[in-house]
Image (cartoon, coloured by chain):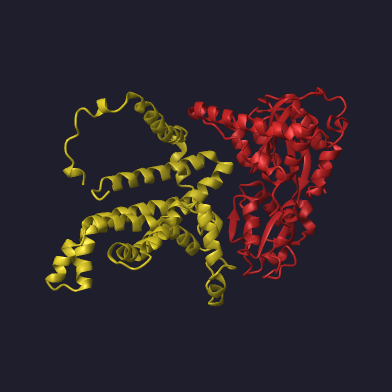
Amino acid sequence: MRGARPARPASTGAELPRWVLVPAAVGALLVLLPLVALVARVPWAELPALLTSESSRAALALSLRTASAATALCVLLGVPMALVLARTALPGLHVLRSLVLLPLVLPPVVGGLALLYAFGRRGLLGGQLEALGVSVAFTTAAVVLAQTFVALPFLVVSLEGALRTAGRRHEEVAAVLGAGPWTVLRRVTLPVVLPGLVSGAVLSFARALGEFGATLTFAGSLQGTTRTLPLEVYLQRETDPDAAVALALLLVVVAAAVVVAVRGRPAL
Amino acid sequence: MRAPKQGRRTAGCLVRPRTAGLRAVALSSSLLVLTACAGAGDDDGTGDAAPGLPAAEATAPGTPVPDELSGTLTVFAAASLTEVVDDLAAALEQQHPGLTVRTSHAGSSELAAQVEQGAPADVLVTADEATMQRVVDAGLVAGAPEVVATNTLTVVTPPDDPAGVGSFADLARPGTDVVVCAPQVPCGAATEQLEEATGVALHPVSEEGSVTDVLGKVTSGQADAGVVYATDARRAGDAVREVEVPEAGAAVNAYPVAVLADATEPDAAAALVALLTGAEGQRVLADAGFGPPGGP
């Protein structure tokens, strides 16, 4: 709701103790300096060649494909989850909410181990899946699964926040006017929270694109099948640091675009 | 998994790479690390006076190593050498109570990259000669590297061997999920040599960035088989079943050690190299499954 914000009082600077500026500046430097250092290392002359090499193109294509699929899965599963969390009063809902948010704060490698013990060949479900002839080990599906696992909370949090902010007034009016639950959801609720849904989806996409730890632990690393951009950066660093930096720049650009896209929306 | 003997002591003493821009921040954090590690070293050194080996064995005849070494020696060693180097570092600390040895373990290429970026190390041990050559070519090594051990490849499967692997050739059978190292890392380059020597072309389901990731895929049962170093198979113990490869001698990885040009403790660094190449070091290396420097 930035449009409604009153004009900033002119005396803000005087109300803060001066010394606050020092740690604030150090903090800003800590965030900016590594990015500047990375960009300074980019071999601009070879950049086109590095970004269009066979392995780079394979990793980029795979990353875009898997992150898009993961985002679609996040929307498919996350929208109902956010609706349940924001609009129902089931017992134990706050426990469920905390659990859903867990992947957000979990170290990715831990997520990878957890996925391994659930869906791996020797995992909780892996045996049954194997019996059905389904094996996700070392497949692109494993990458999408890992990305969805880590990205889902972003969509749920964004959308649940938007749902709570929007309130139920419009929905109640529509219901009084005779609209059924499905019509209310489709014609009232979702259009109202659309900006929140979009920013949640964009954040999920970015998180899925950057997924590394869970993919490495759970899916493996094979060009064109499971080696996404972050895994390619990690491997290239071993022999060709220039290629790693070039691909890293690509990820930074995507991340910056995502931040701009999300900050530009009124919902956040 | 067995914890390395000195793991707790060294865990907090990892050295971070610096970029030029972050030098000030990195410097202050490494100073903190240094203080913390010096404290830990004092605890270790004063408690027990019994030396792990006679002092004469540690110093090769003619090597100009003074009796009393002090300060902090920083050793960068390939991940496969973790237990060996930590054991020898502890032995060196016991011989020289004033000396603290910090060890940092990672993939060889990663360590080389850290040295190239100016990480403060005295000794570097890599898992292959090509990686060491990179550091030599960058003019960062004092003197010539010396090979201290060799390692060969072997095949491991989960203990119950779901795919029935009896030889290297069995790995190429359709439906066998084989995991190897990526060709970009030393163990992957060695795997390619072994494929050439055996005439068996593998179609791996995953090419990992480190040999520990290959081993992990096998011990967790995700993969039917993996190609790892003999030392990894030895360390994994009962968690894997080993299928020895007769042609393993075709792909021998040599482990060179070198004192770095920017070493702040060149004398202590020379003492550690002497320890590694001496009888005690060779015994510890052989116990861990390494071959002698000349190859198996």
Q: Is residue A171 left or right of residue A249?
A: left
Q: How many marks?
A: 0
Q: Position of residue B92 (x, y in %)?
A: 78, 33
A90 is higher (above) or lower (below) than A66 = below
Q: Quadrant of residue A126?
A: bottom right
- Quarter of the N terminus of chain B within the rendering: bottom right
B69 is higher (above) or lower (below) than B203 = above
Residue B184: tell me if it is visible.
Answer: yes
Q: Position of residue B235 (x, y in %)?
A: 73, 53
B58 or B116, which lies in front? Answer: B58
Q: Is residue B215 left or right of residue A125?
A: right
Residue at 52% over, 57% down:
A112
B140 is higher (above) or lower (below) than B179 = above
B128 is higher (above) or lower (below) than B261 = below
Q: Is residue B203 left or right of residue A49?
A: right
Residue B145: tell me if it is visible.
Answer: no
Chain coloured yellow in this rendering: A
Residue at 42% over, 44% down:
A250
Q: Quadrant of residue B218?
A: bottom right
Q: Position of residue B205 (x, y in %)?
A: 59, 61
A163 or B202, which lies in front? Answer: A163
Q: Position of residue A24 (x, y in %)?
A: 37, 31
B84 or B11, which lies in front? Answer: B11
**Chain B representation colour:** red
Identify the residue at the far bottom of this view.
A132
Residue at 63% over, 38% down:
B111
